[in-house]
Image (tube, rainbow, N blue to C red):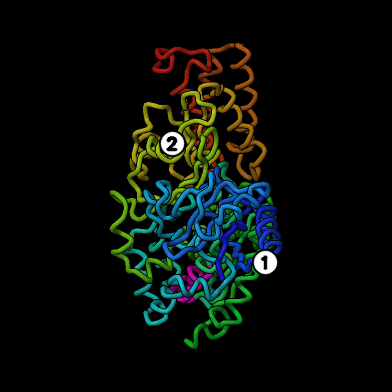
Amino acid sequence: MIKVFVPRDSTALSLGADRTAKAIAAEAQKRGIEIELVRNGSRGLFWLEPFVEVATDKGRVAYAPVQPKDVPSLFDADFLHAGAHPLNLGLTESLNWLKKQQRLTFARIGITDPVSLDDYIAHDGYKGLANALKMSGADIVKTVTDSGLRGRGGAAFPTGIKWNTVLNSPADQKYIVCNADEGDSGTYSDRMVMEDDPYVLIEGMTIAGVAVGATQGYIYLRSEYPHALKVLNEAIEKANQAGYLGDNICGSGKAFHLEVRRAAGAYVCGEETSLLESLEGKRGLVRFKPPLPAIEGLFGKPTVVNNVISLATIPIILDKGAQFYADYGMGRSRGTLPIQLAGNLKQGGLVELAFGATLRELLYDFGGGSASGKPIRAVQVGGPLGAYLPESQFDTPLDYEEFSKLWAVLGHGGIVAFDDTVDMAKMARYAFEFCAIESCGKCTPCRIGSTRGVEVMDKITSGKDHAKNIQLVRDLSDTMLNGSLCALGGMTPYPVLSALNHFPEDFGLNKKEVAA
């Protein structure tokens, strides 16, 4: 029976994938043709969704974008046997967008049925856990440390060091917490993992539990992700039934239990201590550090807090080895980063590349340039608290240290592009406004500084006491940067000052005034 693949990813659904799938099933029935319709994950070529594939002897052949009205002509062209059609893109694996990537964390995404455990195992699933169960906790932690994996949530803290702290913190109970509260603008890699390959996250969290001696895990899931919630719960239930979760994982005598908790709908709950407060049922307020969550985290117990991509990368490291993963990347940035292209681009979507690729490659080779056809003037990397980078910095390689030299952050790997119609003074104002709305209110620099920032930006754009208020923005940014309790207030100056420094004309300044 011929397999036809139609994605069930949220992006594909929003672009009509369900309607396309129903049309294909109905047309096949009408013509008396038996097919197996598989609802896979998205390959990440979002501008081509709904992205339909047909399994052939030579590999999967892609047709895209397929709307219900295209379905009869596809059957007329014998698309089930790779027939010629205007929507025929050829072999999926031969598409440049995919060929030029290094897919490690996303190796299965777009290929398998997300909720099929058999499919996951057939594509190298649970090999990492099998290896981990034969190792000591210290050896697992060493493998993760040697791989060079750093937190993919923003701070880029070495994952192995965090795990080692929890491993060596004696306690009667330890926890693994997955930060799945993906709230940065232009980001969706976490969502894609949870919707399109949930078992890789479950396996990664289970390995983490085995490594540090934690028996309970929680996925703190963004409240705006209903499809991910459904998929995760279904996958967790199947993993429990098959013995990959529970009191006796794969007969090893080791226990690990996992459940999903809905997030509070607050951006600040993406900060790990605020997340823990929310997970405990309290208001999401940032905690003072120390103590670190690795020593006193959830319910006062040692807790590993990692984001989705960090944990979803663990299985391939335990399967292929630390050196395999460390061989990708540059400098101290090892491995790959799932990059999310969004904003004013012709070809938005998910790209996974080894560290070292440049912004220019991503914007033009993968993104296809601006959707409007106008020059790309600025990109914001790393969410709403990331710096704005001008065209002169587009050749910067994606590397934590290289970005740090520019006073910028890679963050969660989200890239949002803007063409030359953008008003950067308005974007700077928005950064202050976003912080004012999302602040937990615990510290004064963030709570009051962001509100005053909006007011001062309004004075600047109206031309009132111009020089005085520009200096006031700089002073205010310095206070927020150095005085805020967490990164929300502490990083709001990144977009503000980068907009001011790189695009002074939008603030009514010239280059000399900026230098002064």
Residue range corresponding to the magenta coloring? 202-213
Using the image, determine if residue 176 lies above or below residue 426. below
Q: Does residue 211 show up magenta in the picture?
A: yes
Crowding around mark 2 (Cα neighbors within 10 Å: few <14, some 14 to 19, many 20+) is many
Q: Main secondary structure of the magenta part?
A: helix
At x 50%, y 33%, the residue is 417
Q: Which image quarter holds the N terminus?
A: bottom right
Instruction: Return the residue at label 2.
Output: 363
At x 53%, y 72%, the residue is 174
Q: Which image quarter holds the C terminus?
A: top left
Q: Residue 123, how many percent across, how many down?
A: 45, 70
At x 37%, y 79%, the residue is 136
Q: Residue 247, how many percent across, how many down?
A: 57, 84
Which amino acid lies under the numbered mark 1 shown in the image of this protein? Gly
Q: Secondary structure at mark 1?
A: loop
Instruction: Return the residue at label 1.
Output: 32
Using the image, determine if residue 376 lies above or below residue 74. above
**Viewer can see residue 293:** no
Using the image, determine if residue 145 lies above or below residue 467. below
Left or right of 50 on screen, residue 294: left
Q: Does residue 414 show up magenta in the picture?
A: no
Which amino acid lies under the numbered mark 2 shown in the image of this protein? Leu
Q: Secondary structure at mark 2?
A: helix
